[in-house]
Image (cartoon, grey):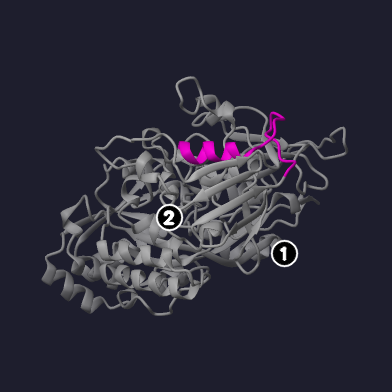
Amino acid sequence: MRVTKGAQIVAGTALLALAVAACGGGASDSGGTAAGGGDTTPVRMEVGEPQELLVPQNTTETEGSEVLAALFSPLVGYDENKQPVEESAESITTEDSKVWTIKLKSGYTWHDGTAVTAADYARAWNYAALQDNAMSASYFFGRIDGYEDVHPGEGKKPTAKEMKGLKVVDDLTLEVTLAAPFSQFKTMLGYTAFYPMPESAIGPDGKVTQAYGEQPIGQGLFKLDKPYKKGTDATIEASVYDKYPGKKPSNWTKLQFKVYTSSETAYNDLQAENLDVHDSLPPSAIASAKAALGDRYFDEPDASLGYIGVPLKYNPDFQDVQVRRAISLAIDRKTIAETVFSGTRAPADDFINPAIPGYRQGACDACTYNPAEAKKLYDEAGGPKTIEIGYNADGGHKEWIEAVANNLRANLGIDVTPKPFEKFQGILDALDNKEYKGLFRMGWAIDYPAAENYLTPIFATGAIASGSNYGGYSNKEFDELLKKGDQATDAAEGLKFYQQADDILIKELPYIPVYFYRSNFGHSTKVKNVKLNLLNQIDWADVEKA
């Protein structure tokens, strides 16, 4: 999955498969008991292969973020009202939304036993921001004073190695000065990129070591038992960190992430009790999942959004807005949501999800199915006669992408070819390297609960080089409205500017919204109290062995 949960970008959505994959193998684990009384049989969760090594500041997709969320404790979490609440932070305060004081809770230690300090946060954030380090999450530090000195942009060299807006006041206090007021800064701090980094992560050359990326030292609930060799290992093994100061599982100590390339195979393993948690059931299973799993099946609201991405900057075939509008009008969202997704999706009609303040029902007029108008616009604009739509085959996206392809063939009279990439990593790398020029499946799961998070990381000009703007979209008016929203001291006033920026996206369609997600997940009979939080991550401390 990818969602820059960064942003997270969603890859492994629960999608319909027409044929049931062969059952995954593997015998059930035998039980065991730790010396302290905790069950040593691991709780096993399905994940896709992380795109990169496990470095928080270079992880902007959901699979790596899920693993890292078990290893690190964020500065803030979110309550039922989607408001930030301190987690590893004792307090986060400001008088002007520009200068912020972050006080850390005492008692947090790294998994090697050393104390976590404010300097560890400054180190991580400066490392992420420095252009020479090429961290994928660097854009999230762009509001801190001095970011332009360390990240001046393509073709320019940094004039500093650290942002002047970060000041370590004492071991437990970090002062952050932004370039301009931003009222939602505290809300951002639950995101993966803002995790701290221990001094031992940096090698003699000033770069994060491969050893750290394979076995990061965190300060969270779980610590890795061994290095994870990406592309080779089928599991990621972790144990409860006994010095973690927060809540721990009541009757188990081992966690195992099982890496799958097929959501259907994972679901078969879940039914066979060879997997305990599957957070993205394939809709080939959804029609029968309630009967098969009973109260172990969940269908809940989700703040994510699925798109057809458009390579605006890299393919002239799609640069006419009328072509993009025609493609959008040609997509039968309602049928896809009801038939392909068995009613577990809703047709998208905005670039902001209904779960977050700022959504406006029916805002996207081009999201209404109108094949006659689509054909007329497409012909008038001279749209391309052939189109390719790339997608990751490991996320179960084949059926809905083929449904979109059928819509475009029938309604626009063109040839459309779905192009599967074996792994999500493959299509992300092709987009990162500007190698893929076709339309592409993309999704977004929020990094933090704010309307702005659906806009800035995906469509701002600055997000082309160091964000998730895979289409290369750039609009000066859009960027200015984001800035006005950022600097508004009143949340309601800021939201008005974000909605005006949203209006520009609706008019220009740099991506084509297709559906709003719901979370469809399930668990085995061996565990209980399995819950997804706002960021679509498991709250492991609440999970119990049944």
Say which of 69 and 112 sits in front: 112
What label sits on residue 397 in the rendered view? 2
Q: Where is residue 330 in the image (x, y as percent from the top left)?
A: 28, 71
What label sits on residue 295 in the rendered view? 1
Badge 1: residue crowd in 10 Å (few <14, some 14–19, many ≥20):
few
Residue 116 painted magenta:
yes
Identify the residue shown where x is 69% and y is 39%.
222
Q: Judging from the image, what secondary structure is the residue with disc 1 in?
A: helix
First reached walking from the N terminus: tag 2 or tag 1 = 1
Q: What's under tag 2, amino acid-wise?
A: His
Question: Is residue 373 toward the left or the right of residue 488 in the image?
Answer: left
Identify the residue shown where x is 71% and y is 40%.
108
Q: Is residue 238 above or below residue 413?
A: above
Q: Where is residue 224 in the image (x, y as percent from the top left)?
A: 65, 33
Specify the segment rendered in magenta.
Answer: 106-127
Say which of 293 and 235 sits in front: 235
Residue 21 painted magenta:
no
Q: Judging from the image, what secondary structure is the residue with disc 2 in?
A: loop
